[in-house]
Image (cartoon, rainbow, N blue to C red):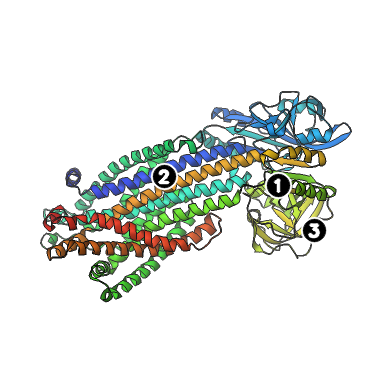
Amino acid sequence: MAKNFKLALKIVARDWRSGELTILMAALLIAVASSTAVNLLGDRLARTMNLQAAEFLAADLVVGGHHQPSETWRRQASAHGLRVAGTTEFSSVLIENDELLLVGVKAVEESYPLHGSLRTTLSDIAAAAETRDVPKPGEAWVEQRVLATLGLKLDDDITVGEKPLRITRILTHEPDRRGDLYSLSPRVLMNRADVAATRVIQPGSHVHYYELFAGDERALRAFKQWLKPQLHPGQRILDVHEDRPELGNALNRAERYLGLTSIAVVLISGVAIAMTARRYTERHYDMTAMLKCLGARERDVLWIYASQFLIIGLIASSLGSAAGYLTQESVIHLLRSLLPQTLAAPGWLAVVFGAATGLLILLGFALPPILRLKRLAPLRVLRRDLEPLPSSAWVVYGLAGLTLSALLWRYTHDWVMTLSILAIAGIAIALFSLLGLSMLSLGRLLLPYVSLPWRFGLQHLTRRPRLGVSQILAFSITLVAMQISLLVRTELLQEWKRQLPQDTPNHFALNLFDTDLARFRETLDKEGIASSAYYPIVRGRLTAVNGKDVFEIVHKDSRAEASINRELSLTWASELPRDNRVVRGQWVNGADPLSVSVEAELAKGLGIEPGDKLTFNIAGQELAATVIGTRSVRWDTMTPNFFMIFSPGSLDAYPHTWLTSFYLPPDRKPVLGDLAKSFPSMTILEVDALLKQFQTILRQVTSAIEYVLLLALAAGFTVLFAAVRATLDERIYEDVLLRTMGASRRLLRNAQWVEFAALGFLAGVLASAISEVIAWILFSRVFDLTYRFHWETWLATPVLGALAIGLAGYLNTRSVVKNSPMRVLREL
């Protein structure tokens, strides 16, 4: 064994000096470097975006519920080095100057918020400034609506329960303001130390407690794992992906894209390494035959070459990981002004994974050619045309499939999806192989009608159809990986531009009464302010599905659990909201009264189907409604959206208010004061800060996608060049023979262009077809985007494929044309 390893080292050293390892090392180095760079950059940007998104929760981790958090949580959090803050939210009625107002009270500790900041002002709402302070004991910060309704001003007192509090600031923004009853009511912010003195919270009171945690990512994961079993049924861990769906959808799509791009780089790398490993082993047929003549057994041959590839893999993976790390650091440095001020630190696991990916790809795709070497007959020494028997198909495809399965699972964490992707890919490759054979057959029919350079070039492709098809498929897979990354990136950016146009609503008007509705519309029209649709709001709680208590149906920690633990905003409408789409059943318009359309994800979480009976509790009264259909909802648009929409007339018996949203430019903020005075019962919820932060994160997500795509495309073209070089040996021998027989340089040069350009064109056509199928699956199943036919790629990809592969082939075969045939043969 030691002797075989020593021999492997000698062969590697000799091959390195002779240049035999140049292509294989280059392909592997590029593969590992690009994979590491994409993984590192994607991981850092994804974690940075999640850290910034944490500002929407005012913490990294939040636990909410009706039960008061245990002190044990804080002790355990401190043991993990986490920062902690707590808030308490409840509703209360304020009575001042003979006026009554229902407000949402939020009591906070001095350490609140852990992320983000509050915004307050002493006079003009437009001049609000950020602050990390909170009200001192005995003080309160209130929204302008409280002052206008109760006829108060700064330094006046309000009484919350039995505790008088002095108003010291006007509150304009909270980072973690939610869409529940307390948040939509006019807000009063007070110090948590004053809650006991209010005597508002009594046994049976409806109170929300929130415990906020922030700290190191690893410590948070460990603490979260410890915390989950400690939660009561009414408590749950809040998550920005679910509790801020307008942001969560964008982050989910960005994370999926980064994972998809990483898979594309791995796939490109696998193709290149498979082709270069095959070339390397073919160039060692003679040496292997000689070793067998000298007494080497099959297992000796296997050990010698496996050791070589292991040595090559370790060296190339180490160098590639270092190069990938330096690449992503260079990208970060060059684009510093476009990225967030604080970036997450590099994750060393991404570097280790890059190196491991290189070894896994190398062994997975290079082992089948090695298995062929061990079966090489010693007679090869005498018969140069004798090649080893091919490996069993299950070995070749099985090893490659296992490698891809492991890498795909790493990004999807879903075996069903991973196996589905591989099964679909296998079927697609079989079908497109037949299509490739058909294309080559068509090329063969053209031979009698084309000029001599075209005839030579096409004959190279069509003489061995199996080899030609394998080359077309290899280049097609590379082009597909690059094309899919580009297509998804383009559609995501276009979707986000449509999602947040310049006039995206930045204010919500709530608590509009029927008597104010017409006058409010007229006021907005007079001011030239466009609004979204107006929706009536009835507060109600879902209690049963088909007579079964919802708490017996719902899964713990699911989004559905969050929805049934609070009152929902119920509405009715005759027209389907613009960003909604009926998934099952039908729309409620024209349906019988007491019909309801349910948001699709909530319906899935509760197992609700069209025809089911839902029971609601509205102001102490029960209401039964029949589910007529489910619909998808675009939560990432800044317009009113609802879990439940009833048919017109279903909720007429219940008191309701109206809700709408509108856009107001920053220079027209004074209009808000006029609206507050004209409609004292109305609540205006400003989401400027939230929208600005959302747009900032989307810009950063966009930057991340752009730069990761550039890395992927650069890796793709570089590896494509190396892969072309790995297929040239047999062509070079044929071209040398033609040169010896008198073929001119011009004829050979043109034939090379034709051959490689045709190869690239056919690969581009095939890649366009495969990409279209994959794009349809990705857009409809993974990214929740509207699919459209990409006719432009059908035109561009074959042309670009012909140019790229044609240029790569021409540059790699220049030595045949420029140098003497004898010199070329000596270099091979």
Label total for image: 3
User: What quarter of the picture does the C terminus occupy?
Assistant: bottom left
Nearest the eye: 638 or 646: 638
Q: Residue drawn 11% across and 53% down? A: 294
Spatial CA distance of label 3 from label 1 is 27 Å
Establish if 801 lies above or below 105: below
* Pointer 2 with pointer 3, Cβ within 8 A: no
**239 horizontally vs 316: left or right:** right
Which residue is the site of mark 2? 38
Which residue is the site of mark 1? 662
The location of residue 462, given as percent across then percent down, is 27, 69
- Whether residue 375 is visible: no
Q: Residue drawn 38% across and 57% down? A: 479
The location of residue 228, given as percent across then percent down, is 59, 40
The location of residue 448, given as percent across then percent down, is 26, 76
The location of residue 125, given as percent across then percent down, is 71, 33
Label located before the other in sequence (1 or 2): 2
Nearest the eye: 666 or 42: 666
Nearest the eye: 30 or 203: 30
Label 1 residue SS: strand
Q: Mark 3 packing: few (<14 Cα in 10 Å), some, or many (20+)?
A: some
The amino acid marked with disc number 1 is: Phe
Q: Residue drawn 42% across and 59% down? A: 422
Q: Mark 1 packing: few (<14 Cα in 10 Å), some, or many (20+)?
A: some
Label 3 residue SS: loop
Foreground disc of the pair 1, 2: 1
**763 horizontally vs 121: left or right:** left
- Whether residue 804 is visible: yes
Quarter assignment of residue 136: top right
Foreground disc of the pair 2, 3: 2
Which residue is the site of mark 3? 650
